[in-house]
Amino acid sequence: MNTLPFPLREADGLGRRSMTAMQGDPRGADLRLRGVRRSFGDRAVLRGIDLDIPAGQFLAIVGRSGCGKSTLLRLLAGLDAPDRGEIAIDGSTAPQRGVVRIMFQEPRLLPWNTVARNVAVGLGDRDGAREVAAALGSVGLSDRANDWPSVLSGGQKQRAALARALVSRPRVLALDEPLGALDALTRIEMQTLLERAWAEQGFTAVLVTHDVAEAVILADRILVLEDGFIVEDVMVDLARPRAHGQPKAALIEGRVLQRLLGAAAGQRFARMDG
């Protein structure tokens, strides 16, 4: 029995979406980075990143604190600019308004606006009551449209933030640890909701997370950043939807952890899950 606040998609539907993403989806945008460098003072955070992200792919970026994950995401979202190198969206390096939306760990809802009005912020100056209603419905918050953010739970606030990010149907969704502050059960619910939104809308997703298991559950591909370099690029060739604890998922998780924590740590993890 489904206890989530939204309907689950059929497994074969998610599987077809995954294959479409790997082949390139016209609803998403492709991203290309060449020689991207970013420093803060004397500290080099990104040291010449070359990266291609096909349209519609779900990419996860993991790494230790301070490795450059969030800096890279901010560059992709247009919130910062590289010192050197170029970032192109669909082949263009010119700024493209409304193509990329970002979701943070904190919901950042406006306390003086209702939930519906907070979601409408994602439309800018455009009036779109129908789009707002649809976005709220897609995250299971139709009955909370006229509530104030202060009466929502943490998970409900993040669902409202996701609706705000998706209401304009962006072609790229940047996710900066959006589930990091949630409890374990709410986090799993949000992972399911996020995957469903990606499957339905077809946007390119770039997720920064410290949770390797979350990366394996959600992503088509996982990058490991270390000292400003991409040191591992792992394809997650698993059918969707995925479940925590799957043996094949555990093997991929162990490989990524081995790179992050060292060979001994990765082997211990593999034995525990084997």
Image (cartoon, rainbow, N blue to C red):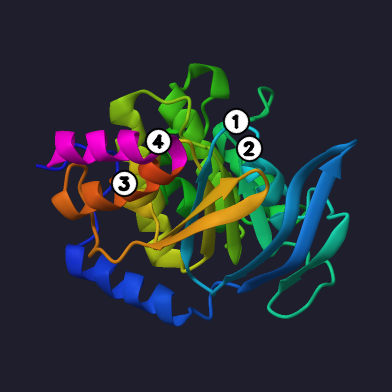
- Disc 2: which residue: 118
Residue 17 in the figure: left or right of residue 53: left
| Three-letter code, disc 1 | Thr
Q: Using a 10 Å C-alpha cutoff, classify the residue at mark 2 as few (fewer than 14 neighbours), some (14 to 19) or many (20 or more).
A: many
Query: Nearer the observer, disc 3 or disc 2?
Result: 3
* Measured Cα–Cα span from mark 4 to mark 2: 15 Å
- Earlier in the chain: of badge 4 and badge 3, it is 4
| Three-letter code, disc 3 | Glu
Residue sitting at 48 percent across and 78 percent down?
A: 25
Query: Nearer the observer, disc 2 or disc 1?
Result: 2
Q: Using a 10 Å C-alpha cutoff, classify the residue at mark 3 as few (fewer than 14 neighbours), some (14 to 19) or many (20 or more).
A: many
- Disc 1: which residue: 114
Residue 261 in the figure: left or right of residue 192: right
Task: Please give the label number shown on residue 78.
Answer: none
- Disc 3: which residue: 253
Tell me which corner region of the image, top left, top right, bottom left or bottom right, holds residue 171.
bottom right
Q: Which residues are magenta?
A: 260-274
Q: Are marks 2 and 1 in contact (CB under 8 Å)?
A: yes
| Of 163 and 34, the residue lying toward us | 34
Query: Nearer the observer, disc 4 or disc 3?
Result: 3
